[in-house]
Amino acid sequence: MTPRFDQGPWAAAGVQTVQPEVHRVALPLPNDGLHAVNVYLLENLAEDDGIVMIDGGWAIPEARKALEEALAAIGRDLGDIRHILVTHIHRDHYTNAVELRRLLGSRVYLGAGERPGLEMLHRLRSDEPAGSLETLRRAGAGELADHVQAMDHGGYDPSVWEAPDRWLGAETLRFGERELRVVPTPGHTTGHVVYLDEQRGLLFSGDHVLPHITPSIGFELTEPGGRPLADYLDSLRLMTRYADTRLLPAHGPVADSSHTRVAELLTHHDNRLAKSLAALGDATLDAHAVARALGWTRREVPFGDLSAFNQMLAVNETAAHLDVLVLRGRAAVKVVGGVNQYTRVR
């Protein structure tokens, strides 16, 4: 499928210089959902005058070509990329980083929380979202899980799922005179991290904070577990402990205030929690049933009108909201036949 750039000016090919020596480049994606992913080129950070790149894109020829053209526009080439800092393990962020390392010898960095998912992927020798499928089954959506499992997920290619050169925790990376703070932000994935340039007031937010959409929660390769939405909300609040910055997201345009968007996302999830609780009513329901009662996207699209993949995301997100309601004492859950059944607490 030919990548399309039809989601607004931010997704158009070319280079946006955010500020001197910081450039945003939209790379194409081979799907009908999000059509581009932003990568960022930071000049004169590496000790040898090379480039630090944030996120890698999807390993397709069109992305390589777009990146080469963008580098040429700023008087650089692929050989200048020395370090690639990836925000999370999803294919549209990680696989091209591995390809570029093979081609250029660049060093690849990834959050340590992604290690279990990568190890499971190698054990299963499949890149289907095993954790998300298990969550679907526990949510009462077994038929949907079977359908999604039977879909073509692109095929397992071990060459694009190699381990990074360095696993990152909460730490500060130093490149020449510049520093980038690594902040773990679990939620979208267990090992998601953001990169904070406090000197220049920039937040490279990956999929953690997006300007126009809300990121999916708990879309995992690894085994389900934990509390992805509760972790995500905590990770959002964590952003407010740092000074406000410009927001440089993986999808969408650069925005002026990370704090403003964080507040909007927190409000959005408060509203979804309220709607999920209302959908429970006086019944005992699984997450699949609650998801079918809710509208989706800004346009309040009925659940049945979503694609199978987006239905999976919707059910998993609903399960995450219901689990937060349980944590807050607003709902109770019991397991019946391997399916979580939720009841409103009066």
Image (spheres, rainbow, N blue to C red):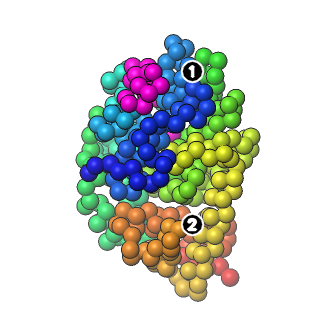
Q: Position of residue 151 (x, y in %)?
A: 26, 59
Q: Is residue 183 left or right of residue 101?
A: right
Towards the viewer: 19 or 280: 19
Residue 254, picture quadrant: top right
Q: Which amino acid does label 2 sit on?
A: His
Position of 69 with respect to 275 (left or right) is: left
- Viewer-proximal residue, 96 or 158? 96
User: How far across and down, in percent of the image, does residue 122 sit?
Assistant: 32, 41
Within 10 Å of disc 1 (Cα), the crowding (few <14, some 14-19, many 20+) is: many
Residue labelled with disc 1 = 45
Give me the residue at 54% from left, 27% from top. Answer: 42
- Residue 308 rendering spot, x and y as whole percentages: 34, 66
Question: Is the Cβ of the residue at disc 1 closer than 8 Å to that at disc 2?
Answer: no
**Where 294 sits versus 189, above or below?**
below
Which dot marks residue 321?
2
Q: Residue at x 54, y 85 (%)?
A: 283
Name the residue type under label 1: Leu
User: Would residue 222 be seen by someone viewing this image from the given angle?
Assistant: no
Q: Is residue 250 left or right of residue 122?
A: right
- Tell which tag, 1 or 2, sits nearer the viewer: 1
Residue 339 has which mark?
A: none
